Image (cartoon, grey):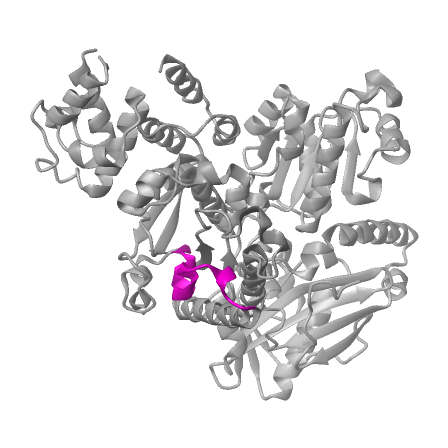
Amino acid sequence: MDLFRKLQQVIATTLKVAPDKITRETSDQDLVAWDSLAHVNLMMSLEQSFDLFLEVEDFSRLTSVPAILEYLKGEGRT
Amino acid sequence: MSNRQLDLERLLAFRSRDTLRQALRQAASPILPHIQRLTDHAAGLAPAMRELRLGVVHSYTSELLDPWLGLAGALEGLDVETYHAPYGLNLAEADAKSGLVAHSPDITLMLLRREDLHPDLARPVVGLRPGEQAKLAAQAHDRLLAIVTAFRAQNIGHLVVTILPEQAGPALGVYDPQSERSEAAWWSALKADIGRRLRAGIEASLFLDLDEVLAQIGREAFFDNRLWYSVRFPFAAAAAREVSRRVVGLGAALKFPKAKVIVLDADNTLWGGIIGEDGIDGIALGHEYPGNAYMAFQRRLLDFQQRGFILALCSKNNPADVDQVLNEHPHQILKPEQFASIRVNWEPKTDNLAALAEELNLGLDSFIFVDDSDHECALVRRELPEVEVIQTPARPVEVPFCLDQVSRLELLSLTAEDQKKTEMYAQERIRRQLRQNAERSGSLEAYLASLEMVMTVGIDDPAPLKRLAQLTQKTNQFNLTTRRYDEPHMRRLIDASNWMVGYFSLNDVFGESGIVGLALFDLSEPAVAELDTFLMSCRVIGRKAESAFINVLLKRLAASGVREVLADYLPTPKNALVTSFLPDHGFAVGADGRFRRDLAATPPLPDGAYPIAIEVSAKSPAIEIGALV
């Protein structure tokens, strides 16, 4: 499964929205469900699903699909 | 990654909640994406989920507990509906018009921090002189009581109070226990005071000690520093999971039929090996592995007895073989007299369980069945779904702890009666034997007289409040109307001048029964008393106690001007026992289906009508734990 599809699934499951609502451009501004608490849950889900360790500083940067994809690629995840 | 995936698929194949709970105990905390799948799976299993309404009052972020609460709930068969009060310790929620009260919670969880009790707790307690430390403790204690009292005054279910442990160890590090100003000592003393105050003065409340959770999972596994400093949520996955499990477990103890008896297998449960094959010298029970693990389990069962659960033994063996171990084995901790019943035979365990239910006068839904055999556990699960089944772990080292996370074995209150349960059942076995002898020789009256029974009746006395509320919640068979009252409601009835609350305890030559009967009369109508509740513990059936009790209460009512008593019998699947109680006691059924007794036409009987001496006190002495010796 390509990286975007995997990320799409993780976000959809964590935020409890339909996967097709998550596009390659989606950011936290686009979804009501992506509020500050859901964002924290998402950070935890990303860590667990992609075997990452996120710093608190990363939390506020990874607020959109493009940002997260870039981060994942930078960490060598495929 | 693929490893986790495999575990999830294995867990999703489980078909019953108790096996799933046991399997998850061994597993690491599930990751967030999996929690939802596990929750949905558990929710879909039989029986249908019941609702648990939870209110959360918090001074730190609590919403992130929701996935864990949902999972813990689904694993118990509870659909958790949670209301999180607005952030911050807001006493405005302790108001009849608040969102919290509107939510009608079964449990209100208070998530507090030390600083909520006193601002000075944000600085080292060890910096204070002993006198100042004492003052700080008193003020913190008073502040907590003020908060708890404000919330307790509202209808918000059982109040569960928690205080977040400190993230850092004591200020003085390893030296703390030896310091005169020890922080740990100060904090322990404050918690003990809080426990005392809640027990004595705040109904339906429990201090849930998070330091206990900390001890269980370890400080480093408890706190998530990143979540704490970014969104003020303190719990790492292990802590969120354990705290949720404990809170939901209290909900299970409240919502499901009360557990009363633990039925134990013998081979590979109380000892290692099979007595019939290995002989008394071959079974593992002693100070070496694996016998020491089984001894530890027997020792742990003594703790459950202290909680008021009775033990029964049910084993497929020759009775002589099991007797030999119980009576002669030097390391056998549980002796025959510690079991309310012992059934050793070759009959199916399901038949034995049904017979036990009848013998002990308890419903099967109050049974916890513990057995190592896959086959026996599966059979009981299939044939007797109301029995909770715990399979003894195959690994001896896990056996001592196998009952530690059974929610229905947790207590929300403890009375003197609870701690004496086993003894009472043992006494009852002797009485039963004597009675059978008496019946055979035709001298039942002589038997009853020989018991030299004395009934102590209390009227409108708040002292045994916990026990009275407990009686309404637990008594299913000898119960005319099966109305359930919690402690706050019972307290209101006792205090109300237009209600009469009567209870009794029965002592005889064998021992004391504790408080075993309750009657509630509504006296709102002039000259009429309506019997709202009449119940009695099955323990004292067959001694005319119920007749003597209702008679003395009717005498009291007649003396205060009541002419007519109104009563109802509301049949349930469990209370067929009392179908003829009202007709047998002078009540006649009317066209409206209600029962009436005219106290002038059928006056109460005089003293001496029953073989029981009766003492009535308007204010009975308080019964405290330890008073029944």
**Identity of the residue drawn at 44% across and 40% down:** B222
Q: Is residue B525 magenta?
A: no
- Could you tell whether B474 is left or right of A74 in the image? right
Q: Is residue B590 visible?
A: no
Q: Is residue B71 above or below residue B137?
A: above
Instruction: Locate residue B349, reporting x and y percent.
Output: 69, 28
**Towards the viewer: B523 or B457:** B457
Quarter the C terminus of chain B occupies: bottom right
Q: Is residue B10 visible?
A: yes
Q: Quadrant of residue B605?
A: bottom right
User: Compared to B332, does B306 lie above or below?
Assistant: below
Residue B259: x and y in percent read 60, 45
Read off the magenta span. B106-129
The residue that appears at 35% across and 43% down in the rendered structure is B65
Locate the N terminus of chain B and report the quarter of the image it occupies.
top left
Q: Is residue B124 magenta?
A: yes
Q: Position of residue B479 (x, y in %)?
A: 59, 59
- State left or right for residue B527 relative to residue B541: left
